[in-house]
Amino acid sequence: MGLETHIRLVSDPTDENAITPFLGRDFTWEIAFGYLFEEKSFLSKEEWEILAPQNTDDIHGAHPTPLNQIDLASVLEKTKKYLKDNQDKLPFEIELDHDKMEKEGLSCEIIINGSRCWIQGDSNTFDVSSKVKIVNYTTAPNAVEMWVDIKDKLEIEGRTYYLRKVTRYTKYEEQINEIIDLCKQSENKNQLVYWTFR
């Protein structure tokens, strides 16, 4: 996919299959580079510099600059607190409630008019208020553009779908905690970390 953020102990071998938190494109842009936040004063300029991972393309095969794991963990704790305290102000996502769908034995594919569809549910990107738009994938045979009320349960063409609202705090809390835990492990081993993206 690209634009993933990676963290590893300095002593760890370079191994793309190593078990580390998966920090994809959303995390990289919204959290690590701070594009989610209009208000940035909850971190200092120096703390934003710590949070921004080093681009491995810029170092041309050399080792990245090691980062103090205590500093990174501290910045992430502040970021997590800001996400928690500002859940109602920050963007959110409306998505299928996969757990509930699977528990009810329902398919997690949205099929409308014979086409596979998806929910334009990210309020940071799309128009989401009391309604949300469902559209077809570009490869689907039939065009779909349907506005639906945001509620827990939808019935469309005889199919049942459960929705849920996901705050940015809910979306990123587990990932941030995993990074903080890894920072604590590296502190116990008295090692710095590499914090990079590519």
Image: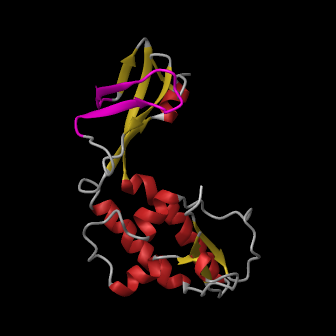
On the picture, is 61 further left or further right than 100? right
| x and y, in percent, of residue 23 in the image | 55, 61
- 50 relative to 86, above or below: below
On the picture, is 27 further left or further right than 195? left
> What's the residue at 31%, 44% (across, down)?
126
| x and y, in percent, of residue 59 in the image | 62, 83
Q: Which residues are magenta?
A: 129-151
Which colour style is shown?
Answer: secondary structure
Q: Quadrant of residue 8?
A: bottom right
Q: In the rendered view of the protein, which quadrant contains the N terminus?
A: bottom right
Pick whichever, 133 or 21, lies toward us: 133
| x and y, in percent, of residue 137 in the image | 48, 32
- 74 relative to 110, above or below: below
Q: Quadrant of residue 156?
A: top left
On the picture, is 71 further left or further right than 131? right
On the picture, is 63 further left or further right than 110? right
| x and y, in percent, of residue 72 in the image | 49, 79
> What's the residue at 45%, 77% (across, down)?
51
> What's the residue at 65%, 88% (across, down)?
190
Check residue 128 for magenta coloring: no
> What's the residue at 57%, 63% (across, down)?
4
Q: In the rendered view of the protein, which quadrant contains the C terminus?
A: bottom right
**How many numbered circles does the render carry?**
0
